[in-house]
Amino acid sequence: MAYNIDPKQQAVRDEVREFCRKHDIIKKGVELDRRPEPAQFPFDYFNILAKAGFMKYSYPTIYGGGGKSGLEYNTMIEEFAYHDPATSLLISIQQLAGQPIIHYGNDYLKEKYLKPAANGDLIMCFMLTEPEAGSDASNQKTVATSDGDNYVINGEKIFIMHGDIAEAGVLFCKIKEEGIRDRVSTLIIDLKQSGVTQRTLEYKMGMKCATTGHIKLENVLVPKKNLLGELGKGFRFAMQTLDGARIGIAAQAVGIAQRAFDEALSYSKKRMAFGAPIAKLQAIQWMIADMSCQLEAARMLTYKASLMWDRGEKFGTEAAQAKLFATEAAGFCVDKAMQIHGGYGFIEEFSPIGKLYRDQRVTEIYEGTSEIQRLVIASNLLK
Ligand code: COS
C-alpha cells in the first residue's frame, strides 16, 4: 500500500509501530478490555502515551504541541487503532477537547487549559451530548445564568468520553442573557468543584480502555472569563470541531478494517478445510476481495479529507463522507473477518476478531451516527 502514503506518513507509521511493539499495545489493549467493572480510567497508561507526545500530536508548537499536520495526526490514530482501537480513542479525546480552545480560545484559556492538556497534566473532555440532545445536538437543556463575574450552571451531560474523571471540560450550554436566550455558547468548566457529580458508565460493549462518563451539574460556578469565543456561537464551534473529529473516527475505522483484513487473510491461508487452506475456496476469496476494496476506498476518503483540512479548504462534506464510508467499511470487514474465522472468531481466547467486532460498532454511532453523516452530506450538496 506504499503508493497511498507519503514519507511523512511513513515516518508516523514507523514511530507508532515501534511504540506499540515496545509497549506491547496489543496485549495491553486486551488486558484493559478485560478489567472488571466499574472500569477505572487507566491513568498510568494515559501518562505513558502523553509523555510520548501522542496527546498533543497536532496541537500547535507555540502551545507546547507536536505541530503535526491533520494527515499525520490521522495516520497516527489509524496505526494505534490497528493495534488497539480503544487506545486510539483514549488519545483522540484530548484532541477533541483541545481543538475548540486552539481555534476559539483567548491567550488566558490557552495558557490555563491547553498547555497542561498538551502534556497530559490536565485531562479534558468535550461536553456536548445530553440525555435529550444526542443527534439533535442544538437541543441543549443545560443552562447558565449570570451571577456577577460568574455563570451558574445547571444541567446534565451523558456519554462524555473521559467525563467520569476529567478535570476540566469544554461545556456547551444555553446562557440566559438578553438577546442570546436560545443560542448555544461554550464555556471552559473546572470539574473538580462542588456541585459536579461524575460517574463512570458501566458495561460498555467495546472501546473499554477509554472510559465514558455521566456528569451532573448543580449550581456550578464558571468564571465569565472562561467563555470561549463569542456568546451564542457555541453550536457553530461544536459543529466545526466535530467536522475535524469525524476524520479521526474515519481513521480509527481504517485501522480496525486493516487489522480485520490482515487477520482474515493470514487465517485463511492457514486454516485447512476439505483438504486445502480455505483461501483456495472462491467463497473466501470473494470476501477477501470485497474487504480489500472497502478498506482501500475508506483509506482514500480519509486521507483526502485530512489533506483538505491541512490545505485550509472547506472539508465538512468530505469529513462526513469519510466517517460514514470508513466506519461502515470497518463494520463490513469485521463481520467478514468473523465469518472467515468461524468459531475461532467468535471466541476471544482464539483471536482478536471478537474484540475488533465490539470495538468497531460504536464508530458508526459516536461523533455523529451514520444517519447524521448522510444528513450532513445531503444538506451540503443540496445547498
Ligand atoms: N460548521 C459550522 N457551522 C455549522 C455547521 C458546521 N459544520 N453545521 C451547522 N452549522 C451552523 C449553521 O450554519 C447554523 O448557523 P446559523 O444559526 O447561524 O444559521 C447553525 O449551526 C444550525 O445549523 P442547522 O440548522 O443545520 O442545525 P440542526 O440543529 O438542524 O442540526 C445536525 C444539524 C443534525 C447536523 C447537527 O445537530 C449534528 O451534527 N448532530 C449530531 C451531533 C453529534 O455528532 N453528536 C455526537 C456526539 S458529540 S462527541
Image (cartoon, rainbow, N blue to C red):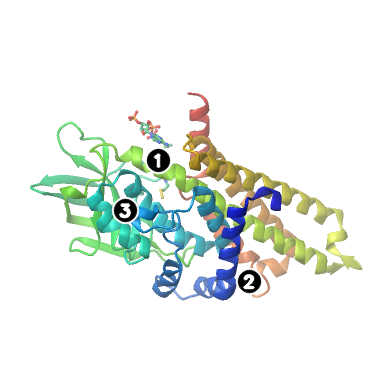
Viewer-nearest of labels 2 and 1?
1
Which residue is found at the position 43% from the left and 58% from the top? 66
Can you tell which mark lies on residue 348? 2
Q: What is the distance, in whole Å, between disc 2 and disc 3 at their CAs?
A: 33 Å
Instruction: Single out the mark in the foreground, 3 or 1.
Output: 1
N-term mark: 2 or 1: 1
Pointer 1: residues within 10 angstroms few (<14), some, or many (20+)? some
In the displayed image of the protein, which residue is found farthest to the left?
Answer: 148
For residue 240, which numbered disc appears in the image? 1
Sequence-first disc among 2 and 3: 3
Tell me: 249 left or right of 93: right
The residue at which mark 3 appears reads as 157
Asked if marks 3 and 1 touch (Cβ < 8 Å), the reply is no
Note whether ligand 1 is within 8 Å of mark 1: yes
The residue under the point 34% across, 55% down is 63
The percent position of residue 130, horizontal first and vertical second, equals: 34, 49
Q: Is mark 3 within 8 Å of ligand 1?
A: no
Left or right position of 23 against 242: right
The amino acid on which the numbered mark 2 sits, given as a three-letter code, is Glu
- Of labels 3 and 1, earlier in sequence is 3
Residue 271 is at least partly visible in this image? no
